[in-house]
Image: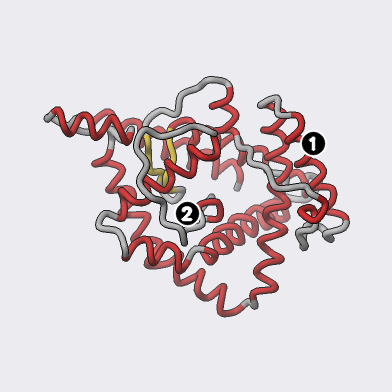
Amino acid sequence: MISMRRHLVAFFLLAFIGLTGCSSIPMTQAEQEETAAVNDPAESVNRVVFDVNDFLDRLLIRPLAEAYRAVLPEFIRNRIASVLKNMGEPVIMANNLLQAEFTRAGTTLGRFLTNTTIGVGGLFEVANEYGLERQTGDFGQTLHSWGLGSGPYIILPLFGPSNIRDAIGLGVDTLMSPWKYAVFYGDTMTKDTFTIADMTASALSRREANIEGIDALREGSLDFYAQMRSVYRQYRAKQLGVSLASQAPVFEDYDAENSTPVMR
């Protein structure tokens, strides 16, 4: 299952790059300047992929997220989200180390140990009470710290807004996920069950957290695609500690950290 997921990511990325090469280049000077500002040279292709993702969200993902909210009480949903975040801490710590951010890595390790033990396997967020705040760290961020440019903005099928660098980072972070190592000695069925459960729970938990935010963002935007691109770019710039040349206001009710497309 994990191997299939890696192949899907690679296929979609290669297919997108191929389509990018066939996309049209703006003919007017104004269009060229606008394209350069948003770093979206393949916008025509991106919009098609975005529309497909949005269609799948309306048809399937959002209704499932609503059902998830209706069936499980908030307390249980919060416990599931807490466990999922806790299992992401080893990936954050690994990237902190790769970025030579040793203090942040130590904080992340402390968070993981505290929430795993005192927090009963991550069911409860207790590390914050000890001053251990959650850090950021992914392989796209690591590549940025090593000096690699972002590359053009892209929309990945199912995964959503990204860029070439972060798409590569997504694949590496997936490989580093501790879930499959937690069942290293299990049989294939056990590993596949954990993988499917992780993907499903992550998608539903994060989508449920943004039902109202994404709805308001969609309804309040003259151009939903452009608004989502702006939100992603600004949130990512904040994570990386860089500034954007032009800043449009971010929609405040949208939780970028907890947002996710289908298979993140």
Q: Can you tell which quarter of the image residue 51 is in?
A: bottom left
**Residue at the extreme left:** 28
> Left of 32 or right of it: where is 246?
right
Residue where numbered disc 1 is placed: 106
Question: Between residues 117 and 20, which one lies in front from this camera angle?
Answer: 117
Residue extending farthest top? 147
Q: Secondary structure at mark 2?
A: loop
| Residue depicted at x 54% and y 50% | 264
The mark lying in front, picked from 2 and 1, is 1
Marks 2/1: CA–CA distance: 30 Å
Say which residue appears at 87% left-offset and 58% top-offset: 118
Residue 72 place in picture, x, y as percent: 63, 76
Q: Which mark is residue 261?
A: 2
| Amino acid type indicated by mark 2 | Pro
| 242 to 257, vertically: above or below | above
* Residue for point 61% across, 61% down: 201
- Residue 229 vs 143, above or below: the answer is below
Q: Amino acid at mark 1?
A: Gly
Secondary structure beneath disc 1?
helix
Which residue of the protein is positioned furthest toward the right in this rendering? 117
Q: Is residue 119 above or below residue 6?
A: below
Disc on the earlier residue, 2 or 1: 1
- Left or right of 54, for residue 238: right
> Residue 260: percent from the left, percent from the top?
50, 54
Q: Residues within 10 Å of mark 1 (few under 14, many from 20)?
A: some
